[in-house]
Image (tube, helix red, strand yellow):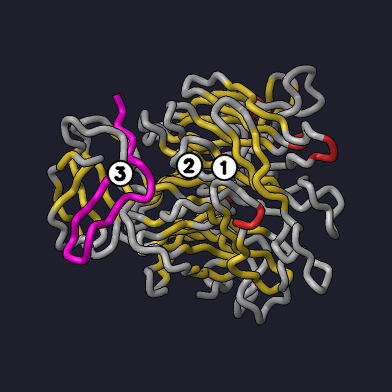
Amino acid sequence: MNFNDAPGAQPRGTLLQAADGDLYGTTSKRGTVYRITPNGTLTTLYLFCSHADCVDGDYPTAGLVQVTNGDFYGTTMFGGAQSTPATASGPGTIFKITPGGTFTTLYSFCSQAECADGYYPGTRLVQAADGDLYGTTQAGFYGAYRSGGTIFKITPSGTLTTLYSFCPQTHPTNCLEYSPSELAPASDGDLYGTTDGTDGTVFKITPAGTLTTLYRFCSQANCVDGADPLGGILQAANGAFYGTTSGGGANDGPYPGGAGTVFKITPGGKLTTLYSFCAEISPTGSCADGAFPQTGLVQGNDGNFYGTTSFSGVNGGGTLFKISPDGALTTLTTLYSFCGLPPTCDGTVSPSGLVQDTNGDFYGTTMAGGESNDGALFRLSVGLRPFVKTWPPFGILGAAVGILGTDLSGATSVSFNGTTAVFTVVSGCHITATVPAGASTGTVKVVTPGGTLSSNAPFRVLP
């Protein structure tokens, strides 16, 4: 599918598969929230800057999250109640939108003195086990110093708490961390993320706001361990975290300073560089395996990781790749190379992170390219079988949990790590189930007439 300027263009952020089976996302140019069906029918749910001075927000770049009440939450980089003709862009907002398109601005940044609450929220929100949403801003103030961003939590009703303020190099302490990434809730109850300031770090933060730096990139000679992790990290099924850096690595190729890496890091902070991009040079002198990954990874239901690079590849417009968890050099495979000559190509410039649909295929967007050079939405099929995913991926005994999938109408059984659960079929793509007594953390399985579908990640039973 190709985007154009009416009503929105230049899609940004990772797509979301919702409980109704459709995909939801945002465009940054003439900012919108949109829904698209698996067969490609697009509906615009909201057009930003619909109010004077863009008090409803503008330039949504981070994608959406669907919380357990069924609504979608997201952020805009600009606009908000503090946006006026004098301030031009405005400091950004947090919003809520229902699947039917009812829109509410929950919070406008810079609502506190000296913008202590931060501004420019440019990453996707995540819902943690406590039910609150967590996110980051790219800037703010910390006393007399301009801050390098914040970590905040906000309740679904809109009460915001700033948990942590990063600072720039001009601040006398804690100056090596700023511009925090999207956060990743982990099985230990904490949240993990990265910063890209001064080569970047990996950190963890408790829900109460205690931050610990786990690793500083460029700690090795010539930054062979990578630099500037922009896409955040995810916790894999084995408990370790995986991510990418947009610079550094063992291979310079045509890019002095390195073309980026894929890395693994333990919860304790031990980092392993799994792959350095630009290990393959094309006949034209570009990095055949891609360069500068700026998004995170997704773990497919085959156990491998899938991701994107923003530039290079044999066609110059970035790549789609997969890599196995052990990271052996021979196991990184370039799956597709985007072209680099818009507008008559399949998409180019900064492909988004990928989402795996429960039909087994991956979906993503490009910010440019396509028929109108305003971006495209693509599907990548690598032959993976359908699966189910739980929503949310955690819960206490007795909690109601959603299960998303395809062709679920005839489901005859649901189990949580082998323990049978009571369930209700809501639709062909949505089941609700109760976490049964005696259930433990593990795989959720749904028996259908077409076969048994397993969850792509373990469901975590909370105490």
Whichever of labels 1 and 3 marks the residue nearer the N terminus, that label is 1
Whichever of labels 1 and 2 marks the residue nearer the N terminus, that label is 2
Q: Quadrant of the C terminus?
A: top left
Kind of residue at disc 2: Ala
Q: Which residue is mark 3?
A: 443
Q: Quadrant of residue 452?
A: bottom left
Q: Give the percent coordinates (x, y) of residue 361.
A: 43, 65
- Residue contact at pointers 1 and 3, CB within 8 angstroms: no
For label 2, the crowd category at 10 Å Cα-Cα, with few meaning under 14, some 14 to 19 and many 20 or more, is many
Q: Quadrant of residue 412?
A: bottom left
Marks 1 and 2 sit apart, C-alpha to C-alpha, by 7 Å
- Residue contact at pointers 1 and 2, CB within 8 angstroms: yes
In this picture, which residue range is highlighted in magenta? 443-463
Q: Which secondary structure, mark 1?
A: strand
Marks 3 and 2 sit apart, C-alpha to C-alpha, by 14 Å
Identify whether 440 is placed above or below 401: above
Q: Which residue is mark 1?
A: 242
Marks 1 and 3 sit apart, C-alpha to C-alpha, by 21 Å
Q: Which residue is mark 2?
A: 236
| Magenta region includes residue 412 | no
